[in-house]
Image (tube, rainbow, N blue to C red):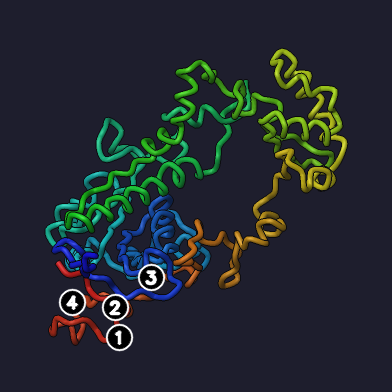
Amino acid sequence: MSEAKTPTRTPTQTPTRRRTTGAGPLAGVRVVELAGIGPGPFAAMLLADLGADVVRVDRPGGPGLGIDPAHDVTNRNKRSVIVDLKAPDGPARVLDLAERADVLIEGYRPGVAERLGVGPEHCHARNPRLVYGRMTGWGQEGPLAQRAGHDIGYIALTGTLGMIGAPGEPPAVPANLLGDYAGGSLYLVVGVLAALHHARESGTGQVVDAAIVDGTAHLSSMIHGMLAAGGWQDRRGANLLDGGCPFYGTYETADGRYMAVGALEPRFYAEFTRLLGIPDLAPARDDMARWPELREAVAARFKSRTRDEWTAVFEGSDACTAPVLSLREAPHHPHLAARATFTDHGGITQPAPAPRFSATPTAVRTGPARPGADTEAVARDWDLPGRPDSESGGPDPASNTAPNPQ
């Protein structure tokens, strides 16, 4: 039997930083977030929820659009410093952070970070391993790259906004969940984590260009496949998954509330029609010519009772039918309460970190970072220049993490 050998560290591997128990799988990863609004802060919150040490670089005066910092849960689990990037020493202060970081996230229009002196070339000159995440709506290049925009305009051009809503009515606006957060934040996080893995394997960082138009279009991949196969009509409310199907949609109840139905499979559909009290219409499922008749019957039945009464009828069944809850109602649903899907921290009810990890659990460790509140702690923990003991070149004994060597 050959003797097991102790693995040796390659020159491209980053020394392990001290982990905080229960802090999440990204404990020890350092992230610099150049403050913005929308998808960038949410992406940074995801990384912070997963345990990364996220330092948000706030600007004096705060963002152009924003809520009370004490209630902005997208800044939970982060720390904050204030840097004026237009001040003479501003860019250098950000570069000092970037030199010690694993990831930097910014959401400026293309070219702005470069003009401010904190673009990819500036940062990579100080830290070649850095993953530089760029979050925009239109992307770093293309005819619209320099144009202003918001979520609704980005998803409009991808075809996804046009899919949502009733036929003959304007497209329904899905808040800013589809574009900003699903097509933007989630794709930025996936890209950053993939690039971080590459950087740790190769020693080389890179730029991640996350555009909301790209991510949102990518979300519709299955629909494009169905469209090409002739299984999807390019219009609203005419398809299996867009409300065109009478057993996949929402229905008003007697009290003006709603029930959601998703009984697609035959056996779930059979249970749905039985519990709804229209078993004689079960055969209409497979006859599209009878779908208007089926929809009318389903709507009439739901209008005969309140939402809570119908919820009780379908309780414990496989009819794939659920009450449509409000934001304030959702945390109290028995299933979500049992799973602790929502949590209370600092008097704010908010979604708990997701997903869940068996070995490295996550948590809401701190409330929303207050602008500039952590300047001294970050300077100490990241061993930034300008501290009294920084000339020694060694980390502060009180530091939770060691600096990222280059």
Quarter of the N terminus within the rendering:
bottom left
Q: Are marks 1 and 2 in contact (CB under 8 Å)?
A: yes
Kindly identify the residue that appears in the image at 30 percent across and 39 percent down: 139
Question: What numbered label is drawn on residue 330?
Answer: none
Among the 4 quarters of the image, the one containing residue 214: top left
Q: CA distance from mark 3 to mark 4?
A: 18 Å
Determine which residue is flagged by label 3. 79
Residue 52 is left or right of residue 256, and the answer is left
Q: Where does residue 46 sit, x and y in percent of width and height?
A: 43, 58
In contact (CB < 8 Å): disc 1 and disc 3: no
Mark 1 or mark 2: whose residue is earlier in sequence: 2
**Residue picked out by circle 4:** 385
Quarter of the rendering containing residue 235: top right
Q: Residues within 10 Å of mark 3 (few under 14, many from 20)?
A: many
Under mark 3, the amino acid is Arg
Q: Secondary structure at mark 2?
A: helix
* Dot 3: element: strand
Q: How packed is label 2: few (under 14 Cα within 10 Å), some, or many (20 or more)?
A: some
Q: In the image, which is nearer the foreground, mark 2 or mark 4?
A: 2
Q: Residue at x 31, y 55 (%)?
A: 105
Q: Do labels 2 and 4 touch, CB within 8 Å?
A: no
Report the front residue among 156 and 87. Answer: 156
Marks 4 and 1, the one that precedes in the sequence = 4
Give the residue at mark 1: 398
Residue 289 horizontal side relative to residue 372, left or right: right
Q: Amino acid at mark 4?
A: Pro
Nearer to us in this view, 28 or 36: 28
Question: Where residue 243 sits: x, y (%)?
Answer: 64, 28
